[in-house]
Image (cartoon, rainbow, N blue to C red):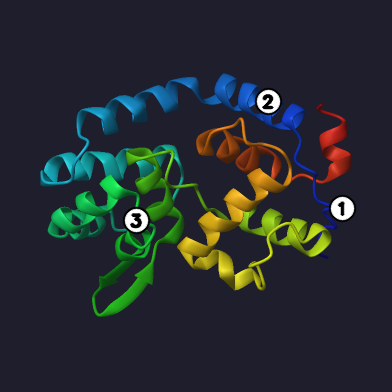
Amino acid sequence: MKHDEGPPITPTEHLVRTAIKEFDEENAVIEEALKDLFGQYSDNKNHSHVLLKVVALNRLYSTNIFAVHNMAKHIYDHAEEIDSALVIGSPEIVDKIARLTIKAEEHHFYSFATKYCSWHRTAAYPIWDSRVDRYLWRLQKRDHFAPSFKANADLWDYPKFRAVVISLRDRYGLGSFTVKQIDKFLGLYGGKSSGMAATQS
């Protein structure tokens, strides 16, 4: 039987601040480790450095990449294109990283790619995962906060997904928060119903 999640949480400044505090308390060491790693190896022109970033992110953010060596080589092989895109914050590069062919079979590691780009430029790349996806779609069906958000599948188009996150920030008066801070709210509270949030706020 499918669990009824209840109505989606309405984003507020208070809940975002609460999420930031909770996230930082629970993940301080992980975040600092990844910040140091991606800061030290900020481009993708060294294969071993790319592998370190892929392995660390996959393990610490649970992105379920079963072929880390393949992904690292894929990123390294397209380093010039990827690095140029990351500098300007191009959303299209997410799909380039996500699509990986292994033994003639194409895979789409979308969540990993959003997180990989985010750790290079947090201000330009909000993070997608299944909880965020589910929450944004439920919130859109109730509040219609993003005019261009027509179908759940829109969230799998990264430029559209990024636009939806910006619409959420604008619609609910969260303009004082960074993309990274909104990520923390979406990651922690996105899967919770309003009733669950009330007990924790």
Which is closer to the viewer, label 2 or label 3?
A: 3
113 sits left or right of 47 in the view: right
Nearer the observer: mark 2 or 1; the answer is: 2
Residue 8's x, y, as percent? 80, 50
Q: At x 52% / y 25%, what residue is drawn?
A: 27
Is the residue marked by circle 1 packed among few (<14), some (14-19), or many (20+) residues within 10 Å?
Answer: few
Residue 186 in the image: x percent, y percent?
A: 63, 43
Label placed on residue 17: 2
- Residue under circle 1? 6
Tell me where residue 198 appears, x and y as whole percent.
87, 33
* Rendering coords of residue 180 (x, y %): 51, 36
Name the amino acid type tagged 3: Ser
Question: The N terminus appears in which quarter of the rendering?
Answer: bottom right
Residue at screen point 86% across, 52% down: 7
Residue at the image position 62 percent from the left and 36 percent from the top: 175
For the residues marked 3 and 1, what is the alpha-carbon distance in whole angstroms?
Answer: 36 Å
Whether residues under marks 2 and 1 lie with C-beta atoms below 8 angstroms apart, the answer is: no
